[in-house]
Amino acid sequence: MKNLTLLSLLFVLLLSCTGQEIPNKEYQLSTAVLAAPEHQRENATVIGFNANGDMIILREGTNDFICISDDPSKDGFSVAAYHKNLEPFMARGRELKAQGLNAKEVFDKREEEVKAGNLEMPDKATLYVSTGEPNTETGEIDNLYTRYVIYIPYATEESTGMPLSPPAPGAPWIMNPGTHRAHIMINPPKN
């Protein structure tokens, strides 16, 4: 989605003047979906932030995709989208972070819960993560870049033939091999 609504553009301009931290709903909806494949955007569920900074469902979708709005408490612009079968895993991560656990603690806790059968982890799922730079003049996200994460729990280099680091620019590789969070990383070369 290249063009944001006029209301979204006005929000971006207002944000630059007032220092307001939480984007309005329209802006969150129009930018959160940028990570999703185009044909999935219109009917995706969107999770964003309310005025207090709490994560809420901004829009219930009718397809299999969930999009996450940019976190205004973090530097930079980053949105994500994934198949709904990954939501229990993602929701648990958000819950553990809200409890104050750091990244390693979240990883270890989810590993323990998946192994115990207490946390559902699909045998395969794709996560799309897009980053960019909000342009206050146009209301668009400049330099939008999407990387791909394909979860394949407990896969290893031996079981997939995937190397543990990219053998060439943009080539796939496996990260966190042998764990619940094993995934194929695909980072296309940037222009």
Image: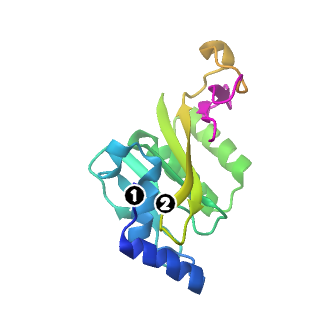
Q: Is residue 16 above or below residue 38?
A: below
| Distance Cα–Cα, label 2 vs label 1 | 7 Å
Q: Label 1 amino acid?
A: Val
Instruction: Pick the quarter of the image with the N terminus.
Output: bottom left
- Name the residue located 65 percent from the left edge and 26 percent from the top edge: 173
Which residue lies under the disc numbered 2?
A: 69
In this rendered view, identify the residue nearer to me: 162 or 2. Answer: 2
Front-lying residue, 95 or 117: 95
Q: Which quadrant holds residue 158?
A: top right
Residue 84, numbered circle: none
Give the prevailing secondary structure in the magenta stretch: loop
Residue range in magenta is 167-191
**Which of the pair 46/166 is nearer the observer?**
166
Among all residues in the image, which is located at the extreme bottom? 18
> Whole-percent x and y of residue 35?
47, 48
Mark 2 surroundings within 10 Å by alpha-carbon count, few (fewer than 14), some (14 through 19), many (20 or more): many
Q: Which residue matches tag 1?
A: 46
Label 1 neighbourhood size at 10 Å, few (<14), some (14-19), many (20+)? many
Residue 90 in the image: state x and y as whole percent. Answer: 52, 48
Is residue 154 visible in this depiction of the protein? yes
Q: Is residue 173 magenta?
A: yes
Is residue 119 visible in the rendered structure shown here?
no
Q: Is residue 48 left or right of residue 154?
A: left
- Residue type for callout 2: Ser
Q: Is residue 143 magenta?
A: no
Answer whether labels 2 and 1 touch (C-beta < 8 Å): yes
Under circle 1, the secondary element is strand
Q: Residue at x 40, y 42 (%)?
A: 37
On the rendered image, what quadrant is the C terminus found in?
Answer: top right
Q: Secondary structure at mark 2?
A: loop
> Residue at left 38%, top 75%?
7
